[in-house]
Image (cartoon, rainbow, N blue to C red):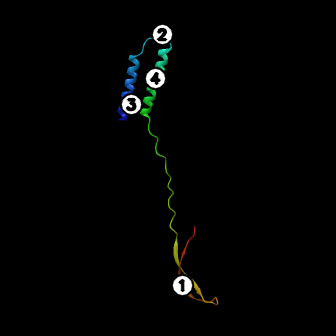
Amino acid sequence: MRKTLAPILAVSAIGALTLSVAPARADSAGPAIAAGIGGFALGAIAGGALAQPAPPPVVYVEPPPPPPRCWTERRPVFDEYGNVIGSHPRRVCDQY
């Protein structure tokens, strides 16, 4: 629609200006002012028809953090006197 509207509007504006042009007279500024206002209006209409909508803003999405690194270690088990009596597997994870 927009690709067909712009050329039709441009051709009709040029045709209307060429058909309605009268010889200039030095004693009256009215036709010149009217032509300026008409040209401005036609330019605003053509510019509005050809204007593209603004692109959507770029949205930055931060990637998710990496999963924690975890492993199993054997940790010593102490009795009430502080002596090692064995070991027990424990899950250990990195802290960021």
Rendered position, 18 above or below 64: above
| Image x and y of residue 40, in percent | 47, 25
Frontmost of labels 4 and 1 is 4
| Residue 28 vs residue 51, the one in the foreground | 28
Name the secondary structure under disc 4: helix
Is residue 23 or residue 41 the one in the foreground? 41
> Element at badge 1?
strand
Query: In the rendered view, would you say 26 is above or below 67?
Result: above
Residue at which label 3 appears: 6
Using the numbered discs, state the Cα–Cα distance from disc 2 to disc 4 in whole angstroms: 19 Å
Q: CA distance from mark 2 to mark 3?
A: 33 Å
Q: CA distance from mark 3 to mark 4?
A: 16 Å
Amino acid bearing label 2: Arg
Q: Earlier in the sequence, mark 1 or mark 3?
A: 3
Quadrant location of the C terminus in the rendered image: bottom right
Between disc 1 and disc 3, the foreground one is 3
Residue 25 shows which numbered tag?
2
> Is there a contact, CB below 8 Å, between mark 1 and mark 3?
no
Residue, disc 1: 88
In percent of the image, x 56 and y 88: which residue is there?
Answer: 86
Query: Residue under circle 4?
Result: 39
- The disc, 4 or 1, on the residue closer to the chain's N-terminal end is 4
Nearer to me, 27 or 2: 27
Identify the amino acid type marked 1.
His
Q: What is the C-alpha distance between the residues marked 1 and 3? A: 80 Å
Q: Residue at x 44, y 32 (%)?
A: 48
Mark toward the start of the polypeptide (3 vs 4): 3
Displayed quadrant of residue 21 = top left
Residue depicted at 47% across the width and 15% down the height: 31
